[in-house]
């Protein structure tokens, strides 16, 4: 049954969601306590970012033991209680599946690095250095030197994706930090270990997986050099959508997923439309849907997230149109503005200063929630939470800290680097959830691991639950609408006003009814015109208390009509 087509997913970043123990770190019992809140919003599925045992080099995306939980998160009994409570409330739980890499502290890697003939050696990707035998031209004071690595692939967190290991004098691949060695999916033993672990969690009763960087699991054969950027290294995506990725996912589906009634979504950076049909095509037997990131690159120069570029609104509309029409009838979309890796959307593309924050947050939600696909809400998005403007000392994220260091060394000014940090760093999304206006926003009675955004006195769940006009209630209403009219799920998408610099207007045409979504993206008043012989239809929702004039859109005004 394709229940996930009607579902709305709420993403919890456990570390920052709710701390029940007072140690400043969010935990499972905190999540359990807040499940009714998520239900109240109207979401059906909770996606938990990793809560597994981990040294936390990348906040849990570096897993030491897939069968254990992080001590700070709680016990397996806590987990079982949470799962039970979720199911009682009609909520499903999906877990993050991080199997492109493990932590270097995982026992497999600990074994793998011991010797070349260790049974776990081939669980990871080991290669000789290019000039290792002669070591000609190498600075021999260091064992790893630029130019000796097996190829020029770069890590997502700056520098080479290869790390020299002095015990066996070979390099291992890590597309992320050096504490996240990549697993070797060509090894059938690795695949069987992963499937076994997935079955273990599914047998416990979880309802599916969000698959971390799943498009990276199949590496390019021969490990060729790629096109390098300024740093001398390629982007970490050089090996995305590798030759065997679909074979592996089909196998995973056959051996695991097809045996359970679950939902799956694959994180697929660098995915094209054609690739997405393969990952998520209804007939393909792989995943239910993918996250694609084309929108997230809109404000990046040459695809580099830290190189800021003015946002191109027309291009954004083209991307929406491409995915809404291109996936129609072929594969299912996911819809999201935010997650734990992205800055807060109201600060990024809305207007987070004062009077327009709520209006623009609601407008952004309206754009997305009229589309076809499964929406993902990231914790706090439903409150219109904003970027906190952290100092570099307050940042915790390895990606930001490494970039900061690298750019300083390359001679960039601090001010310029901080502009990028404020706009893009992942910690923007990771400050504690703002529950109420009590100290630490009600997140923790201890000292929070990340600072709380000082705006919590005005932006918090407690206040918004009381206020029928809040962003929270607007999201709730949008979710209810999606569940009331089939056109939200099935309607065919047409983009109108394509070249308009301020307005996004699209229609969804269903069998019984059509939906018209009209939003003003900017802080100005605009005239609009309905095509001759057409009627506006029944107003389903609007982010202003009333419509002043049908043909006029005020700043950030958003409307949905049923025709
Ligand atoms: C994904 C996660 C991100 C993590 C990375 C490495 O992109 O969303 O948070 O750092 O994978 O696992």
Image (cartoon, helix red, strand yellow):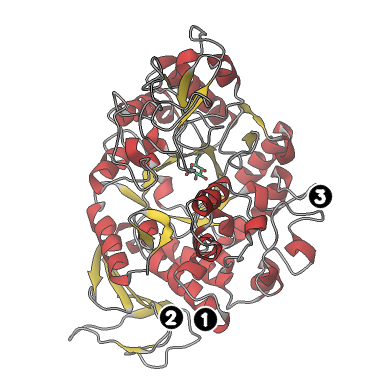
Counting from the top left corner in percent of width and height, residue 136 is at 38, 21
49 in relation to 458, above or below? above
Q: Nearer the viewer, residue 86 or 127?
A: 127
Image quadrant where residue 226 sits: top left
How crowded pointer 1 is (Cα within 10 Å; few <14, some 14-19, many 20+) is rated as some
How crowded pointer 2 is (Cα within 10 Å; few <14, some 14-19, many 20+) is rated as many
Which residue in the protein does label 3 denote?
Answer: 22
Judge whether residue 512 can be spotted in this image.
no
In the drawing, does residue 68 fall left or right of residue 562? right
Which residue in the protein does label 1 denote?
Answer: 356
358 in relation to 403, above or below? below
Give the Cα separation between the discs numbered 1 and 3.
35 Å
Which residue does the image show at 48% across and 76% down from the upper left?
A: 360
Which residue is farthest bottom? Answer: 548
Judge whether residue 66 can be spotted in this image.
yes
Which residue does the image show at 73% across and 48% down from the upper left?
A: 25
Q: Nearer the viewer, residue 248 or 530?
A: 248
Asked if labels 1 and 2 touch by Cβ distance under 8 angstroms, the answer is yes
Which residue in the protein does label 2 denote?
Answer: 556
């Amino acid at each position: 049954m394709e229940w996930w087509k009607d579902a709305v997913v709420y993403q919890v970043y456990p570390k920052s969601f709710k701390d029940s123990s007072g140690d400043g770190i969010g935990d499972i019992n905190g999540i359990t306590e807040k499940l009714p809140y998520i239900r109240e919003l109207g979401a059906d599925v909770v996606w938990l970012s990793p809560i597994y045992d981990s040294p936390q080099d990348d906040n849990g995306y570096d897993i030491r033991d897939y069968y254990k939980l992080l001590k700070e998160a709680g016990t397996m009994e806590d987990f079982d209680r949470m799962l039970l409570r979720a199911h009682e409330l009609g909520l499903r739980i999906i877990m993050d599946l991080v199997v492109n890499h493990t932590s270097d502290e995982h026992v497999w890697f600990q074994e793998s690095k011991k010797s070349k003939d260790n049974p776990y050696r081939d669980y990871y990707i080991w290669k000789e250095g290019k000039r290792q035998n002669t070591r000609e031209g190498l600075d021999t004071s260091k064992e790893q030197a630029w130019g000796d690595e097996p190829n020029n692939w770069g890590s997502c967190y700056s520098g080479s994706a290869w790390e020299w290991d002095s015990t066996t004098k070979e390099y291992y691949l890590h597309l992320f930090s050096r504490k996240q060695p990549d697993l070797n999916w060509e090894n059938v033993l690795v695949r069987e270990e992963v499937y076994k672990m997935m079955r273990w969690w599914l047998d416990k009763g979880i309802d599916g997986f969000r698959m971390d960087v799943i498009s990276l699991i199949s590496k390019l054969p021969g490990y060729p050099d790629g096109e390098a950027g300024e740093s001398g290294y390629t982007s970490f995506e050089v090996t995305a959508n590798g030759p065997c990725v679909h074979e592996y996912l089909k196998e995973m589906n056959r051996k695991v997923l097809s045996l359970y009634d679950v939902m799956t979504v694959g994180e697929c950076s660098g995915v094209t439309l054609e690739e997405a049909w393969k990952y998520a095509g209804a007939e393909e037997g792989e995943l239910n849907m993918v996250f694609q990131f084309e929108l997230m690159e809109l404000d990046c120069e040459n695809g580099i997230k830290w190189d800021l570029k003015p946002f191109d609104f027309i291009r954004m509309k083209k991307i929406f149109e491409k995915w809404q029409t291109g996936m129609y009838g072929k594969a299912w979309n996911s819809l999201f503005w935010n997650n734990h890796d992205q800055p807060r959307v109201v600060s990024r593309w809305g207007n987070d200063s004062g009077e327009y924050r709520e209006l623009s947050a609601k407008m952004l939600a309206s754009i997305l929630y009229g589309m076809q696909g499964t929406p993902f809400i990231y914790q706090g998005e439903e409150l219109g939470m904003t970027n906190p403007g952290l100092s570099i000392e307050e940042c915790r994220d390895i990606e930001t800290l490494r970039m900061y260091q690298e750019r300083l060394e390359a001679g960039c000014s601090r001010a310029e680097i901080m502009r990028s940090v404020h706009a893009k760093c992942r910690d923007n999304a990771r400050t504690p959830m703002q529950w109420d206006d009590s100290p630490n926003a009600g997140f923790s009675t201890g000292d929070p691991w990340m600072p709380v955004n000082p705006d919590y006195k005005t932006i918090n769940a407690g206040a918004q639950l009381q206020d029928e006009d809040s962003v929270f209630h607007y999201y709730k209403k949008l979710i209810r609408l999606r569940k009331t009219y089939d056109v939200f799920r099935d309607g065919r998408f047409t983009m109108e006003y394509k070249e308009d610099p301020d307005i996004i207007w699209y229609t969804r045409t269903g069998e019984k009814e059509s939906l018209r979504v009209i939003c003003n993206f900017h802080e100005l008043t605009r005239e609009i015109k309905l095509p001759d012989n057409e009627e506006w239809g029944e107003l389903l929702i609007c982010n202003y208390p009333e419509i002043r004039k049908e043909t006029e859109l005020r700043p950030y005004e958003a409307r949905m009509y049923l025709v």
